[in-house]
Image: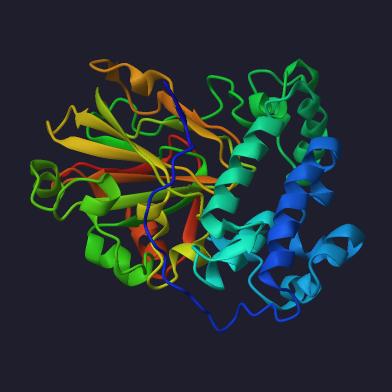
Amino acid sequence: MHLLHHQVQDKPVEKIQPQTNNLSEAQDEHIAKGLESMVAHSETNHDVSHGIHMHGKNVLEVPWIHKMIPGIEKLAANYHIGNFVVVRGSGEKIFESMPIYARIGMHLLFYGSARETVLNYRSVEHLLQEQSIKQGTIYNNPESAKSIPSFVQTYSLDITELLEPDLTKYGCFNEFFFRKLKPDARPVENLENPKGICSAADCRLTVYPTLNLACKFWIKGDQFSIPNLLQVPVDSPTAIEFDGASLAIFRLAPADYHRFHCPIDGVVGEIMNVPGQYYTVNPQAVNEPKFDVFTANVRSVLYLTHAATGKRVAFVAIGALLVGSIVWTKGAEKGTEVRKGEELGYFAYGGSTVVALFPKGVVEFDQDLVKNSEEPVETLVKVGASLGTSPA
């Protein structure tokens, strides 16, 4: 099942002005043209490290970006260009640089309403939607396969774990982006324990036993709620079913393996597709008050019946800036039994997020994950790693 992201939700976004984001020398039109130019550049220039995946620290090495967006070197030098994450097990904190396209998209959202015209009578919403679809089209073109080697080098990817390690065998960049791994590359912890619950993705993970804690430590948008996320009425049976649910938030960075997997033993149920926007899912956007990334972005909701408790789990795949589509594979097969660690689907190009909602009584999260989330800092985990267990 292939969900193309081409619908825009008619939802105004309030003007947001963080105090640490000022790019005073650049006008919105410069920044909008910069994003357009970066996407267009990716069609003919196959070194991603000097295009949309350029790190902020490398801005001065690319004169055309510097000329297109006056002042961008100050943004790269002085403002938010990445995130710290904790490596699970070692406890080491590492800094991950943000691709420059995400930083540009974030600036467009934070300055002025998304409804404001920024370029050729288009709103920010329209611009991000248009460029996201365009980037997906570019990376479906066979010519885009030339970008794969520089992508591997830029992110130091381990190709030995790939099911197909020969980079010349991928027909386009997107085929590599949603690449498959060898069957033993991601062992599932507690596989034989029916109450065991595992990570759904290679990701930066945060977990919260309640929605209130999630909103206290991580999700700051005041419109975020479970009914809004699932797109159901507040008094509906589904909203009542997930009242007081626990949340696990799996954020996938562009370099990550982009197939997502089942966190539980259960049965595949209904899918509901929700139209929406293409805002970045970077933590800085998620942490902005009055800005609801998860409930504004395009998403697809899969309901899974948990074998151990008989309760439904909501598995929400959320698109983001420059993401072309959400594709369900085994997750599209209603009535199919799935085991934890089995593939449910994948994202086409771009960084993305999965939010899993567990009703009361379904999960007790592992304490190291809870502790990190309350700091708050994301934990770097792989598919199949333990997320927690169902209480006895």
Residue at horizontal 72%, vertical 51%?
Answer: 36
Comparing 37 with 10, the one in front is 10
Q: Residue furthest front?
A: 121
Comparing 338 with 40, the one in front is 40
Comparing 364 with 120, the one in front is 120
* Quadrant assignment, res 356: top left
Decide: is 342 above or below 18: above
* Quadrant assignment, res 211: bottom left
Residue at horizontal 39%, vertical 51%?
Answer: 249
Residue 100 seen anywhere in this rendered image of the structure? no
Q: Residue 318, how many percent across, how many down?
A: 42, 43
Decide: is 94 above or below 261: below
- Left or right of 318 in this view: 234: left
Q: Residue 65, how many percent across, how many down?
A: 83, 60
Figure quadrant of the C terminus: top left
Residue 252 seen anywhere in this rendered image of the structure? yes
Q: Residue furthest bottom?
A: 19
- Left or right of 307 in this view: 272: right
Residue at horizontal 75%, vertical 16%?
Answer: 169
Residue at horizontal 34%, vertical 60%?
Answer: 370
Q: Residue 298, how many percent across, how many down?
A: 42, 44
Decide: is 24 above or below 116: below
